[in-house]
Image (cartoon, rainbow, N blue to C red):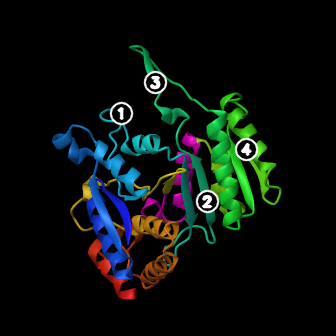
């Protein structure tokens, strides 16, 4: 029996959470879920979008599965995701991007892993209003954070039989901040001579990704570039509806889909649970339930191959239809 935290977000979060829990239960894995809520829906009751009880639950159980939480644009409360990453020191954002059967895309055989530094850069939130016409944000890059994310990327490459790591920066312009990140990547690369190491500027990387994504293997990036490039890579494989994610630290890990909360379709049984299910599969691998993870993955792939897909992938299945089809394959 595993004791794990489930963070139900808002929007479509509760729907896709319920879907994934049903599938995991059908696989036979025994999990005692500590179900927590966060996001816009809990502010009225508790005054904050991320109550202390949520982080305490993750600290107790070490592992969490999380559904999307709305982040207001340009106003309102700070991102729950950013706050969780900071409080739990989830310094590595891991985004595997590969083609799924039955999901038509412009490219075949895409298999890229984005490793994004998760705690600093512009996401540290160091901003100030200089005057009524000027605001500024500070881009903070540290040696400690850069070294450990580079170490994470190369370790991941070794453990997962990857051959190539690209460090992606804008060090030609941001010579001190991105320059520090790049120098740290170079330093760590010397410890892993069996892994090929290349450097690329982020603008060129984006162009190359949409021309020939198959040339890339592992991408190592600072926080902001990683956020943007990981969504670009999701677009190569069918969109955010199939994009998995994990936020990993030395003590804790939170697995979550990377798409938004889609409040416009909440409660309509239209949501695609694939991204959250893919994240849950990685979580099961992480806790040692590799057999169940493989069975669920195979069931998902068979369902997609059979043509049963939600509307965002060109199908007609509802969220519950899709869920039941996967369970039937199990």
Residue bearing mark 3:
127
Q: Residue furthest left?
A: 45
The CA distance from mark 2 to mark 1 is 30 Å
Residue bearing mark 2:
113
Residue bearing mark 4:
185
Query: Mark 2 or mark 4, which is nearer to you?
Result: 4
Q: Position of residue 99 (x, y in %)?
A: 56, 70
Magenta highlight range = 223-245
Q: Position of residue 45 (x, y in %)?
A: 16, 43
Q: Earlier in the sequence, mark 1 or mark 3?
A: 1
The CA distance from mark 4 to mark 1 is 33 Å
Q: Residues within 10 Å of mark 3 (few under 14, many from 20)?
A: few
Q: Front-most of 317 and 48?
A: 48
The CA distance from mark 2 to mark 4 is 16 Å
Local secondary structure at mark 3: strand
The CA distance from mark 3 to mark 2 is 31 Å
Q: Quadrant of the N terminus?
A: bottom left
The question of residue 269 being in magenta is answered with no
């Amino acid at each position: 029996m595993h004791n794990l935290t489930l963070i139900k977000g808002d929007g479509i979060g509760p729907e896709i959470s319920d879907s994934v829990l049903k599938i995991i239960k059908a696989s036979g894995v025994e999990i005692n879920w500590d179900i927590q809520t966060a996001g816009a829906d809990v502010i009225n009751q508790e005054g904050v979008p991320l109550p202390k009880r949520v982080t305490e639950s993750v600290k107790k159980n070490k592992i969490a599965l999380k559904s999307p939480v709305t982040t207001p644009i340009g106003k309102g409360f700070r991102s729950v995701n950013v706050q969780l990453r900071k409080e739990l020191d989830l310094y590595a954002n891991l985004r595997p991007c590969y083609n799924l059967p039955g999901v038509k895309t412009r490219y075949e055989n895409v298999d890229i892993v984005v490793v994004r530094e998760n705690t600093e850069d512009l996401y540290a939130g160091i901003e100030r209003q200089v005057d009524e016409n000027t605001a500024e944000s500070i881009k903070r890059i540290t040696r400690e954070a850069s070294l450990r994310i580079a170490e994470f990327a190369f370790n991941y490459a070794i453990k997962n039989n990857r051959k190539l790591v690209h460090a992606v920066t804008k060090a030609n312009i941001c010579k001190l901040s991105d320059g520090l990140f790049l120098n740290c990547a170079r330093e760590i690369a010397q410890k892993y001579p069996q892994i090929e190491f290349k450097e690329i500027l982020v603008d060129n990387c984006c162009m190359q990704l949409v021309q020939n994504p198959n040339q890339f293997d592992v991408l190592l990036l600072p926080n902001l570039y990683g956020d943007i490039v990981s969504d670009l890579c999701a677009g190569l494989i069918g969109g955010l509806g199939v994009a998995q994610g994990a936020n990993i630290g030395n003590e804790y890990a939170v697995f979550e889909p990377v798409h938004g909360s889609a409040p416009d379709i909440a409660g309509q049984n239209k949501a695609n649970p694939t991204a959250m299910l893919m994240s849950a599969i990685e979580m099961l691998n992480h806790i040692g339930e590799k057999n169940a993870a493989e069975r669920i993955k195979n069931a998902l792939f068979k369902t997609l191959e059979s043509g049963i897909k939600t509307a965002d992938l060109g199908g007609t299945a509802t969220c519950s239809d899709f869920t039941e089809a996967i369970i039937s394959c199990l």
